[in-house]
């Protein structure tokens, strides 16, 4: 057991958790932030992507202990006063989701991309989303949504 | 995942003191954590080394590029200094896994793990790297011992990897479309006097192909290895590629690398 202190979506949290607690488990089961999804649980699908100190990572492949003291942003932290983030709006507008399971991870990865590259090309978007797998919508509308969001962010 | 004790070490000395026969060092965790989740590895203690400041960073001198063991792939791929000194090393880093893996995974972790399909071991062999540990310096040629096996002893921690800057170099990989690991990856580096042709993904461990190296040292042109018939008897054979296909891919990727130099 150890004390995990994080700033999650702007709120300071401090909880005891076993040392083998994954960040994804900590977010979902200790903080009830279930917007972060667990898909493959083998670091391939990207449904669990969150931001840690401004960079995207797969929360199923990090220990809560080894990001101790960091600032974490999950999908729940993107909205402002009940208003969706431009990336979420673009996914909705352009049908960038169908079942929605991969969407939190897609959105978090895409937001990280636009933080680092304000005007990505189609190829750059597809390269960046390599670690995010969608099994129903397909990628055309997702890429279109990221491009749309790039004009609004 | 089975329970373990997590420790965060503040320096190499403390990390090595905490190490035991049932511990592992944790850097990016991109292999360690999945292996533990799948039950392929269990440890009583995980010793986190990424907060040791001395282990991160990139230094370029006239003849070499030295990269701290806990330096992340994204830092190597974005480094202007690496791009200038050894552009092929920067593009190798950019081709590892996906952005989230590159944001976490480290060069020291990659070579300590010595996956038969990992990218960095080929860079170490091609660029005559010296592996600096907390105890000694090890030449890359003596570091990679076999599948997931290295010359590291228990409690021995990689601190930095020093690469020799070549005259020309290129890394060409044929990635598995799903995992992005190399089905075959070939790193060609032309140094003053000789050429290294380091191959990953083809056998149980990275190696320097002596036959191609000799041909390219004589004449640095892809025509000098064109149609070379490599012995496939020790090559990996799996659902992705047969041994014969791998043998042929090694030549193809090596030719591409020479042409790209």
Image: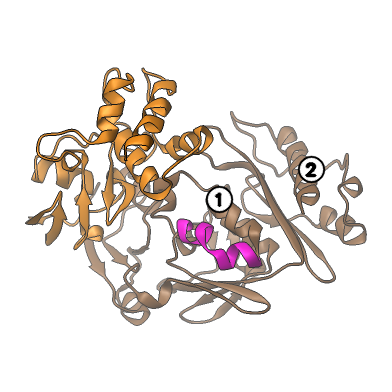
Chain colours: A orange, B brown
Instruction: Please give the residue where the numbered disc 2 appears in the rendered image.
Output: B251
Percent coordinates x, y for residue A104 in the rendering = 26, 33
Percent coordinates x, y for residue B244 in the rendering = 75, 34
Instruction: Please give the residue where the numbered disc 1 appears in the rendered image.
Output: B118
- The C terminus of chain A, quarter of image: top left
Percent coordinates x, y for residue B142 in the rendering = 64, 69
Residue drawn 41% across the image and 26% down it: A144
Marks counted in the figure total: 2
Which portion, as a residue range, is magenta?
B73-85
Mark 2 — on which chain does it sit? B
- Labels 1 & 2 near each other (Cβ < 8 A): no
Could you tell me which secondary element the residue under label 2 belongs to? helix
| Quarter assignment of residue B72 | bottom left
| Quarter assignment of residue A76 | top left
Percent coordinates x, y for residue B212 in the rendering = 83, 53
Nearest the viewer among A54 and B35 is A54
Q: Is residue B200 magenta?
A: no
Main secondary structure of the magenta stretch: helix
Mark 1 — on which chain does it sit? B
Q: Which residue ends up furthest to the front in the rendered image?
A: A151
Q: Is residue B165 left or right of residue B65?
A: right
Discs 1, 2: same chain: yes
**CA gap, disc 1 to disc 2?**
19 Å
Would residue B3 be seen by someone viewing this image from the given angle?
no
Could you tell me which secondary element the residue under label 1 belongs to? loop
Would residue A10 be seen by someone viewing this image from the given angle?
yes
Q: Is residue B84 left or right of residue A10?
A: right
């Amino acid at each position: 057991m150890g004390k995990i202190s994080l700033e999650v979506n702007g709120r300071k949290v401090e909880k005891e958790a076993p040392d083998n607690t994954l960040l994804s488990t900590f977010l979902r089961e200790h903080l009830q932030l279930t917007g972060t999804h667990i898909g493959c649980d083998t670091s391939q699908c990207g449904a669990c992507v969150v931001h840690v100190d401004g960079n995207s990572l797969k929360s199923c492949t990090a220990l809560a202990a080894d990001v101790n003291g960091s600032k974490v942003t999950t999908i729940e932290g993107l909205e402002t006063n009940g208003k969706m983030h431009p990336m979420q709006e673009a996914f909705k507008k352009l049908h960038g989701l169908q079942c929605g399971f991969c969407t939190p991870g897609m959105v978090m990865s895409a937001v990280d991309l636009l933080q680092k590259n304000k005007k990505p090309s189609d190829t750059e978007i597809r390269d960046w989303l390599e670690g995010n797998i969608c099994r129903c919508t397909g990628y055309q509308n997702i890429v279109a949504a990221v491009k749309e969001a790039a004009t609004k962010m | 995942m089975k329970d373990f004790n997590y420790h965060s070490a503040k320096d190499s000395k403390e990390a090595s003191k905490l190490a035991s026969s049932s511990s592992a060092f944790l850097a990016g965790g991109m292999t360690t954590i999945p292996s533990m989740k799948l039950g392929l590895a269990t440890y009583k203690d995980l010793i986190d080394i990424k907060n040791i400041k001395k282990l991160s960073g990139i230094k370029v001198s006239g003849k070499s590029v030295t990269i701290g063991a806990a330096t992340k792939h994204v830092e190597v791929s974005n480094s202007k200094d690496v791009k200038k000194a050894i552009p092929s090393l920067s593009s190798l880093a950019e081709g590892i896994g996906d952005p989230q893996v590159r944001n976490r995974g480290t060069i020291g972790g990659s070579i300590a793990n010595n996956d038969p399909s990992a990218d960095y071991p080929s860079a170490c062999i091609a660029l005559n790297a010296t592996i600096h540990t907390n105890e000694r310096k090890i030449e890359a040629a003596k570091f990679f011992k076999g599948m997931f096996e290295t010359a590291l002893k228990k409690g021995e921690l990689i601190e930095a990897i020093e690469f020799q800057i070549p005259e020309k170099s290129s890394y060409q990989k044929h990635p598995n479309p799903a995992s992005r690991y190399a089905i075959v990856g070939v790193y060609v580096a032309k140094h003053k006097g000789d050429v290294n042709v380091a191959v990953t993904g083809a056998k149980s461990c990275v190696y320097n192909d002596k036959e191609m190296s000799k041909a390219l040292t004589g004449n640095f042109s892809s025509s000098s290895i064109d149609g070379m018939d490599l012995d496939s008897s020790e090559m990996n054979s799996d659902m992705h590629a047969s041994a014969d296909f791998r043998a042929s891919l090694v030549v193809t990727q090596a030719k591409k690398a020479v042409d790209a130099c």
